[in-house]
Image (tube, helix red, strand yellow):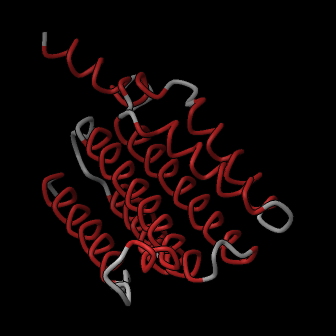
Amino acid sequence: MEKNRLEAFSDGVLAIIITIMVLELKVPHGDDLAALKPLLPVLFSYILSFVYIGIYWNNHHHMLQTVKKVTGGILWANLHLLFWLSLVPFATGWLGETHFAPRPSAVYGIILFMAAIAYWILQLQIIASQGPDSLLGKAVGKDKKGKISQVLYATSIVAAFWLQWLAVSLYVLVALIWLIPDRRIERLLSSQNS
């Protein structure tokens, strides 16, 4: 399979995920700003999840630029990632509707944690198929950012039961860590094309 098909399929799934999330937003029952107040938790959870899906889309795009040949392992690992990301609209809606209650906050964290694990597995599949000296292998290195994110997710899941504000703050922190696209791959691609 050519990687263009994998990219197109993934882009389509991510677009549908964003569409589902936006369709869950309800119109306020009033025409003044006060009517928005009860919807702020829902709106905040939507914005946070939109940023997360955007981060995954951006980094997924960069990672796939390093792929020369798509293997069965890469296909399944990619589907695994898309599965966890497809659960984000559910967790987003539950998180916002319950105003960041403990269980929905923990479930949101579990889904983000599992998506991070799935992304890591996809990364490993690509490196395994392309070789440890491949572009992605060199770019990722020890992947400190990925490991730190997983620790922060695990911490936020536990914190959700006692300090919801801390759990949500950690979700925001991880998003901020990844908001800037991974420059490691860009740098290596640029040096290869020079």
Residue 116 in picture, x, y percent from top left: 54, 53
Residue at horizontal 52%, vertical 79%?
38
Q: Name the outermost residue toward the bottom.
A: 29
Which quadrant of the figure has residue 18?
Answer: bottom left
- Residue drawn at x 26%, y 63% is 10
- Above or below, 75 relative to 121: below
Q: Nearer the viewer, residue 118 or 13?
A: 13
In the rendered structure, the answer to whether residue 107 lies left or right of residue 155 reads: left
Quadrant into which the C terminus falls: top left
Q: How many marks?
A: 0
Left-right relation of 162 to 8: right
Answer above or below: position of 100 versus 147: below
**Does residue 107 sit above or below 134 in this rendering?**
below
49 vs 16, left or right, is: right
Q: Position of residue 156 (x, y in %)?
A: 73, 55
88 or 147: nearer the eye?
A: 88
Residue 41, horizontal then vertical, whole percent: 54, 71
Residue, x 22% and y 12% (percent of image)? 191
Residue 2 picture location, percent across and down: 14, 54
User: Which quarter shows the N terminus?
Assistant: bottom left
Give the image quarter of residue 131. top left
